[in-house]
Amino acid sequence: MVISRSITEKAKEILTKYPMLVISGPRQSGKTTLTRQLRPDFIYLNLELDENRTFAMEDPHQFLQKYQGGVILDEVQNVPSLFPYMKHYTDLRGKAGEYILTGSQHFLLLEKTTQSLAGRVGLLQLLPFSNAELNAAGLMPKGPEIAIFKGGYPRIFDKNIHTHDFYPAYISTYVERDVRQISAIKDLRLFRQFLTALAGRVGQIVNFSELGNILGIDSKTVKSWVGILEASFIIFLLSPYHRNFDKRIIKSPKVYFYDTGLACSLLNIREVGQLDAHFAKGALFENMIILELTKHFLNKGELPPFYFWQDSNQREVDLLIDFGASLKAIEIKAGKTINQGFFKNLQLFKTLAQGFNPDCYVIYGGDTAQPRTNVGALPWNQVEEVLKG
């Protein structure tokens, strides 16, 4: 079954304006499938294969003279030396939409493209399926717990693979292959423990010293490993809001996973029913909602202008969306029944940020939208309605 990707429209637009389109994202997020659907007439080359990688590295001139006019270069970060030559030949030929490049190591790919291909490339990030994409295909999970547990990796839906089989293999492959490519980590067992420790801290402030003390590593190593996980689309960090509404605001970021199914696997959640009594249920629900909104922005080619707010008394708003001229404040609650406690921090924040008059919303685990005075209350499966007001 082919599931339409929301990013397709933006990708097609970029191909009419730039010589190159770069699509980065986690391994198995559907990059190869998307690119081949976008341009089935293009030559496809996987640069993880020895023969293609060796040709590109040893004779880039001949490589780019042979493959031109419509080429997909998959996992292009394997040949970073190719980028200056691509700049030369695309400038020489002056054609839009000549190359589609993909990569699963974001920061490395971003660094190389911005250094060598500035002004010649359009950048997109493709994450696993969004709930909106699954809904359009008639595959929307029946409840938030199922959505959290399954995650969004295409192979789970395309091949009906059980999460027990998919995620442990995915983690093992990632740790054994990608981590070694990005950094010379010697103790992969300890790195996996670090990854699991982060899964237990979803939605929490990242405390580098605490993590280091637990695992017996220094804070510099912790920061380095966080960077590796960001670079390979395993985790992302949410920054605290930069406007000084309260001088006692928190200055450290929170950690979230790019896929909640992966986080569940790391936490050894083996059945959907385990989520109900699990300590991380609320945090995983929060992760899913923030991730869903993140995908909405990335699929339009925009970086999400997302923050959280928390003061020294632990009063917080889970998500702020800063549109420049307007601000949206969102509380995220896994409970299926709305209660007045859901609105308390929003009311406080609205008072502190009264000059900005933020639009306030609660997104919760129930199934129906409920109008409330000054606050919109939306169910988990209507999260994109937040962006329409």
Image (cartoon, grey):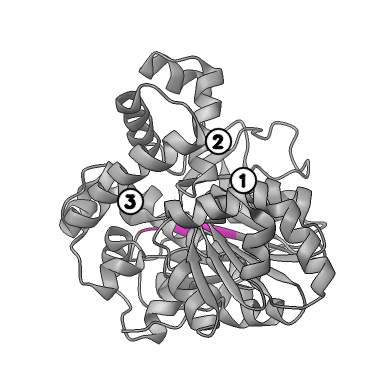
**Residue 143 spot, x, y in % from top left:** 28, 71
**Residue 184 spot, x, y in % from top left:** 47, 26
For the residue carrying disc 1, how many other residues have a C-alpha within 10 Å: few (<14), some (14-19), or many (20+)?
some
Contact between labelled residues 2 and 1, with CB atoms less than 8 Å apart: yes
In the image, 189 versus 378, the foreground residue is 189
Cα distance, mark 2 to mark 3? 18 Å
> Of label 1 and label 2, which has the lower sequence position?
1
Magenta stretch: includes residue 38: no
Among the 4 quarters of the image, the one containing residue 19: bottom right
Q: Nearer the viewer, mark 1 or mark 2?
A: 1
Image mark for residue 163? none
Q: Quadrant of the N terminus?
A: bottom left
> Of label 3 and label 1, which has the lower sequence position?
1
Cα distance, mark 3 to mark 1? 21 Å
**Residue 178 spot, x, y in % from top left:** 43, 42
Image mark for residue 262? 3
In the image, 17 versus 321, the foreground residue is 17
For the residue carrying disc 2, how many other residues have a C-alpha within 10 Å: few (<14), some (14-19), or many (20+)?
some
Residue drawn at (35%, 70%), measured in percent from left and top?
366
Give SS at disc 2.
helix
Residues in magenta, as a range: 330-334
Give SS at disc 1.
helix
Question: Is any part of residue 128 visible from this angle?
Answer: yes
Image mark for residue 227? 2
Question: Is any part of residue 279 visible from this angle?
Answer: no
Amino acid on which the number 1 mark rests in the picture: Phe
Amino acid on which the number 3 mark rests in the picture: Leu
Contact between labelled residues 3 and 2, with CB atoms less than 8 Å apart: no
Q: Nearer the viewer, mark 2 or mark 3?
A: 2
Relative to 148, 44 lies left or right: right
Amino acid on which the number 2 mark rests in the picture: Gly
Q: Circle 1 is placed at which residue position?
A: 107
